Amino acid sequence: MIPAAFEYHRPKDLDGVLSLLTEHGDEARVMAGGHSLIPMMKLRMADVPHLIDLQDVAGLTGISHSDNTIRLGAMVTQHDIIGDAKLAERAPILREAALQIADPQVRYMGTVGGNVANGDPGNDMPGLMQCLDAVFTLVGPEGTRDVPARDFYEAAYMTAREDDEVLTAVTIPVPRGGYAYEKQKRKIGDYATAAAAVQIVKDGGTCTAASIAMTNLSDTPVYSDAAGAALIGTSLDDAARAAAVAAMLGDIDPTEDNRGPVAFKIHVAGVILNRAIERAWARA
Ligand code: FAD
């Protein structure tokens, strides 16, 4: 498959990107790792007369730490996440999730910014970032703004990002407690049939905080306040876990596709979420 003809731009800084976006409007798209966008162009599902490569743009790479937060530049790759020892120590769920994305070749190129900006309900990082209460930094002609991951997703491939804005960084509060990223897929390298991101804080045998999000079970990632709330104040006995699963199943809205019928997806979601909660609790 061959994409339609396009003009390739490779600016060196963000101002250059923004002026190209302003000049070409709807006809321009930024490209990060290209591992979602290029396949879409080859399939002729995306028509991009002006492709703006972010690879040389200064200031979009690097992982930086402060006492309470971690900042990932938009061009940090999934491979970078897997290989960063300090990140693995402070936010191990990121490494656990990144290892379950695609295969090493894709992970060398696929970026955090591209994964969360894409708006594909099958991408793993949007739900993960909702679980971690991440904030996305967007820069456009009107300036800079921060949007919480939990407010970012509107529908499949529709987000709060304006067409002329570039996502420059993802910032997360340093996660506390136990974690698990659990993913059911048809085969190695596949997108999720269902995936769950869970963080749980335990104090003296009682759950004091819980954050839960799931992937590919609706047209957006699903962060469920009610699922987390069902665990707080409990010792995560069977009844508490069942209540959390029931709350999440009330929030998802899967559709039938080549990963299975709706009833199967709901079943898988419950199994995966229960497993993730148990593993996060054991690590808390
Ligand atoms: P690109 O493809 O370059 O861009 C994707 C979209 O985001 C485009 O619309 C682009 O304009 C926009 N964009 C990119 N960066 C920015 C930015 N900084 N600001 C604003 N907009 C931006 N992903 C998973 O999560 N889980 C999987 O299991 C998985 N399996 C895969 C298997 C295969 C075989 C392949 C090819 C891909 C798979 N992916 C999977 C997707 C992969 O992780 C992608 O790389 C990722 O989703 C997009 O990141 P990217 O850097 O390649 O973005």
Image (cartoon, helix red, strand yellow):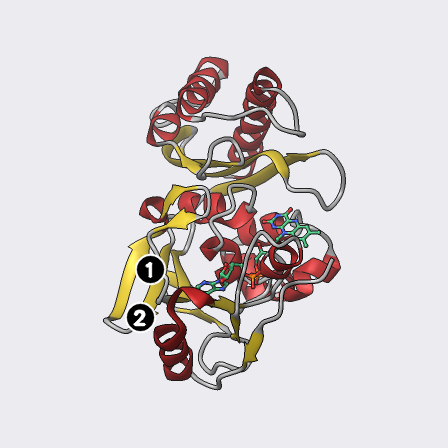
Q: Nearer the viewer, residue 22 or 264?
A: 22
Q: Is the C-beta separation of discs 1 and 2 under 8 Å?
A: yes
Q: What is the three-letter code of the residue carrying label 1?
A: Glu
Image height of 283 relative to 253, above or below: below
Q: Front-most of 174 and 132?
A: 132
The circle drawn on residue 140 is 2
Residue 65, numbered circle: none
Instruction: Say which element carries label 2.
Output: strand
Image coords of residue 249 (percent x, y): 46, 21
Q: Residue at x 73, y 46 (%)?
A: 189
- The amino acid type, in three-letter code, at marker 2 is Gly
Give left or right: position of 154 versus 97: left
Per the image, the residue denoted by label 1 is 162
Q: Position of residue 208 (x, y in %)?
A: 35, 34
Q: Earlier in the sequence, mark 1 or mark 2?
A: 2
- In this orientation, does residue 73 appear? no
Quarter occupied by residue 53 = bottom right
| Label 2 Cα neighbours within 10 Å, binned few <14 / some 14-19 / many ≥20 | many
Q: Nearer the viewer, residue 267 or 17?
A: 17
